[in-house]
Image: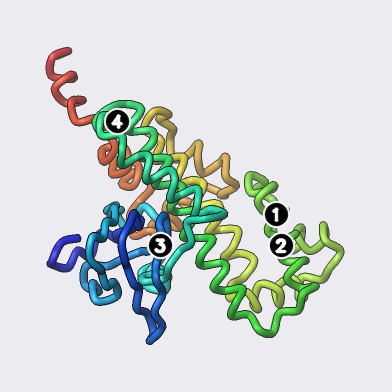
Amino acid sequence: MPDTDDHSHVYLGVHVRGSVTVVRERATTVLEPNDLVFCDPARQHLLRFGEDCQMIFFRVPRCYLGVTEAELNQLLGVPVGGGEGIGALASDFLTALAAKAEFRRSTIGDRRARTAVHLLSVLVMELLEADATDGADDASGAGNEMLSRIHAYIEEHLMDPDLSPESIARAHHISVRYLQKLFQNDGSTVSQWVRRRRLEFCRFELGRSHRRVTMAAVAHRWGFSSPSHFSRTFRGAYGMSPSQWQALATSAFAPADAGAQDGRRR
């Protein structure tokens, strides 16, 4: 990691060998091989390295993860087990990606990098959801089970422009008031949850360089009432317009020799 502050990126370390200890909120955790940890160059004191230590660090633009600065700060220094679940999937994929240097400036490398970014955004969201669940002391077991079913229902109907608190409550035979209370216990609202998930899918689709799509088509497909409403909502969530994000994402992963090839064609 660099010695100076890097406010536009976050670093993800994958432990390979040796002794690495994470210090966070007076608690210490010794990393096992393949474990992961999100890092910030301004907080290098969170990691303590022993002798013969090896870690692989990945630099990821913060805007690609689709979360707020406050949400990202919740994850800095939090060890992620690399032995099971999404943590194992991310660890294995990133380790393999780092080992294939020949892919870094190729079409297949471009696609693998995009897959890695999407995988990390899923990992981040899962960690944030797990943290919110752990802190929801007032939520009953039955309420959590109902909320899980509602989340799954929303995922299946995100493209439906008529998806609303009323339609969701009706489908689960509960009142809108109870539905709102379930989400309130989870630290959100129904509308915020639906909007966030739609934006995440839109962001991913707009960032796919091999499939150029218009902003209006994406907005319509994912249930937004109009392109202008989608644009305002996207900017409010990510600090840039959909077209700016599309240009940033596609240029960031474009092969290095693309410009030279265009020049030869001209």
Q: Are marks 1 and 2 in contact (CB under 8 Å)?
A: yes
Residue at the (65%, 78%) spot, across then down: 185
Q: Which secondary structure lies at badge 2?
A: helix
Closer to the N terminus: mark 3 or mark 1?
1
Find the distance from the CA under tag 2 to the CA under tag 3: 27 Å
Please state, as top left, top right, bottom left or bottom right, where the C terminus lies in the image. top left
103 up-or-down from 56: above or below: above
Kind of residue indicated by mark 4: Phe
Element under label 3? helix
Decide which of 136, 21 is in the foreground and name it.
Answer: 21
How crowded pointer 2 is (Cα within 10 Å; few <14, some 14-19, many 20+) is rated as: few
**Amino acid type of the residue tagged 3 in the rendering:** Gly
Q: Amino acid at mark 2?
A: Ser
Residue picked out by circle 2? 148
Q: CA distance from mark 1 to mark 4?
A: 36 Å
Tell me the mark number nearer the camera, choosing from 2 and 4: 4
Q: Which residue is mark 3?
A: 236
Q: Mark 1 is on which residue type? A: Ala
Find residue 152 and name its label.
1
Residue in the picture at 61% in, 64% down: 191
Q: Going from the N terminus, do you reach mark 1 or mark 4 first?
A: 4
Spot occupied by residue 88 in the image (x, y as percentages of width and height): 50, 52
Among the 4 quarters of the image, the one containing residue 51: bottom left
Where 262 falls versus 222 (above or below)?
above
Q: Which residue is mark 4?
A: 103
